[in-house]
Amino acid sequence: MPLGPSSSAVHIQGNTTGAAPNTARTPTSVTIHPVALFSILDHYLRRTDAQDRVIGTLLGTRTETEVEVHSSFAVLHSETSEQVAVDMEYHRTMYELHHKVNPKEVIVGWYSTGSNLNTYSALIQNFYSQETAPHQAIHVAVNTGLEEGGLAGVKAYVSSPVGVFPKPENCVFVPVPVELRFHDAERSGVDLLTNTVASATSTTSQPVAELEILEQSIQNISTMLDRCLEYVQAVLSGEKKGDPAIGRYLMDTLGASTEDLEKGGFNASLQDTLMISYLANLVRSQAEVSSRLALATAT
């Protein structure tokens, strides 16, 4: 899923010929999970009035050509027109705590809010490049859309030194493609937030009932089943050429279906929901009767 408006990201094609065996390749794509993105937005909402932007560390995994961001944490920093200060000790302490919980996640780069890249961004990039060596550090810029004339979106960059004599503050940020990726367990949460934003008619959003969420899930499953049936019927009638990969996927999905367990779980969940609704109505009625009795006693 793309993030934000279309960008001028450079699709880098890796070239391994003539490269040193211990030289890390430049990442050609970046994927971000919703947990990391929501953590960045939460950090931005909790900033002080004196802060124009916030920064933090990105944690995840990497391959030769792809960086996958799973989580992030905030880093204390202060920024003025004359200098920038980053609490490196706090950064390393937080990373050690995260590393104890998720040993597979390593530092892959850093994030900031806003779309402006300046000399301070180059200095911070140089610091994180030392933390991710020998791999390149990525920089994710999250535009919250609150700037005048700005659109919400996410961009990812890698840096490249410029100049005859390399300096930490002399580098160019090269954009790379970035997309949102989520697991099946995260899909329901993302869909719920998307539907809430799309259907919001006021500044105050009301909590969605469990039955409404269940109804939306059933409707989505029904829509996907209709698409599968249309595809299968088109293949059987000769209108479309069948894809063996899709056929194997459908066969594995149908073969792994546990109809009895699914029916039992659905019925149990439905009974629990109805019982909660019944108890809530009973408590509401009891409270109303108690208030009327108290009013009658007072008069």
Image: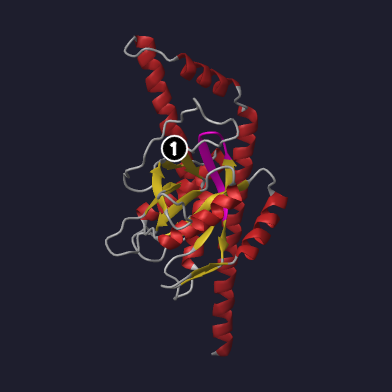
Whether residue 212 appears in magenta in the rendering, the answer is no
Residue farthest right in this picture: 100
Which quadrant of the figure contains the C terminus? bottom right
Q: Position of residue 93 (x, y in %)?
A: 68, 61
Q: Which residues are magenta?
A: 62-72
Whether residue 71 appears in magenta in the rendering, the answer is yes
| Quadrant in the picture for residue 262 | top right
Q: Residue at x 39, y 42 (%)?
A: 2
Q: Amino acid at mark 1?
A: Asn
Q: Residue at x 50, y 61 (%)?
A: 55
Residue farthest bottom in this picture: 299
Instruction: Please state which of residues 259 and 55 is positioned toward the viewer in this rendering.
Output: 55
The chosen color scheme is secondary structure
Badge 1 is on which residue? Answer: 220
Instruction: Please state which of residues 198 and 78 is positioned toward the viewer in this rendering.
Output: 78
Q: Is residue 20 visible?
A: yes
Instruction: Please state which of residues 216 and 119 is positioned toward the viewer in this rendering.
Output: 119
Within 10 Å of the Cα at label 1, are there few (<14), some (14-19), or many (20+) other Cα atoms? few
Q: Residue at x 59, y 41 (%)?
A: 61
Magenta stretch: dominant secondary structure? strand
Instruction: Please state which of residues 21 and 112 is positioned toward the viewer in this rendering.
Output: 21
**Helix, strand or loop for disc 1:** helix
Q: Is residue 138 above or below residue 207?
A: above
Residue farthest front in this picture: 164
Left or right of 150: which side holds 256?
A: right
Q: Position of residue 170 (x, y in %)?
A: 42, 55
Q: Position of residue 89 (x, y in %)?
A: 65, 64
Q: Is residue 273 visible?
A: no
Which quadrant of the figure contains the N terminus? top left
Q: Residue at x 36, y 55 (%)?
A: 152
